[in-house]
Image: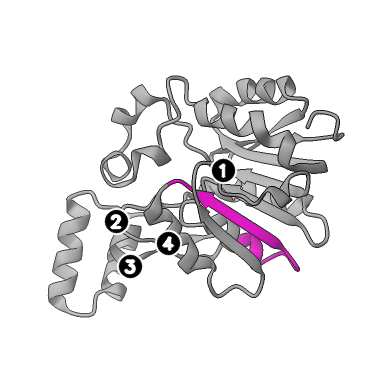
Amino acid sequence: MFAEDEAEVLLASARTGTELEQMVQQRVAGVPLEQIVGWAEFAGMRVAIDPGVFVPRRRTELLLRHVIALAPSRPVVVELCCGSAALSLALASTLNEIELYATDLDPAAVRCARRNLSQLPVTAGVREGDLYEPLPSSLRGRVDLLLANAPYVPTDAISLMPPEARLYEPQLALDGGSDGLYVLRRIIAEAARWLAPNGHLLVETSRSQASATVLALERHGMTGRIVTSDELDATAVVGCLATADHR
């Protein structure tokens, strides 16, 4: 977003001149615009964003496109590392008769996600905990679409990120370990236990990490393919569980 666009958002959001001045000072200090005004735009929707919560990126719309394309009727969907649940919100607003679960380890993200999903006319639940840990065991073998925009920035690269991210977003939403794939490998290792036959795992990653992500899928009995978008500057990997033999 250009400075002129940000200025318009701040002007439209401030109720008084004093509030506008405070907002401008926060933005100059590097606080993400979305945390200042309390919302982010994702897939044409306004998503509530609380202070300290990871701001959804437009590139994650690549995941959204492929999830929608792969969704069966009445899908069972799980989003891990959900943050504000922007992805889940967009899916639930697009797909009919969806059974939806979202999890995150960060209490602030869980509160924000619950607020975003609270008004949806669907079966939805946001649970606090580490990856699969808070999910009901009854979901094992039933998940049609398993999604994750997990942290994938290598630890040493976080210091190179813009201050909006490294200073004001939770490190656990960014830090993917030494090579950026620590959390993704954990997700992939357990995915086959939760996926339905012919279910799909879709994860966001970087171009440089995509091949290693596909290899991790293959080690755990899944096939994988890389999808990209130059328009969104985005890369994702789509994994498929072809049979139930690997659970």
Label 1 residue SS: loop
The numbered mark, 1 or 4, whose residue comes first in the sequence reads 4
Q: Amino acid at mark 1?
A: Glu
Residue at (56% x, 43% y) in the render: 133
Residue 192 visible here: yes
Residue located 37% across and 55% down the image: 108
Question: Which region of the structure is painted magenta?
Answer: 90-105
Q: Find residue 187 and report its image quarter.
A: top right
Name the disc covering residue 3, or none. Answer: 2
Marks 4 and 2, the one that precedes in the sequence:
2
Mark seen at residue 112: 4
Q: Is residue 238 visible?
A: no
Residue 146 badge: none
Q: CA distance from mark 3 to mark 2?
A: 10 Å
Label 2 secondary element: helix
Location of mark 1 (residue): 133
Residue 9 image label? 3
Outermost residue toward the front? Answer: 137
Residue 184: image location, x then y, percent = 56, 31
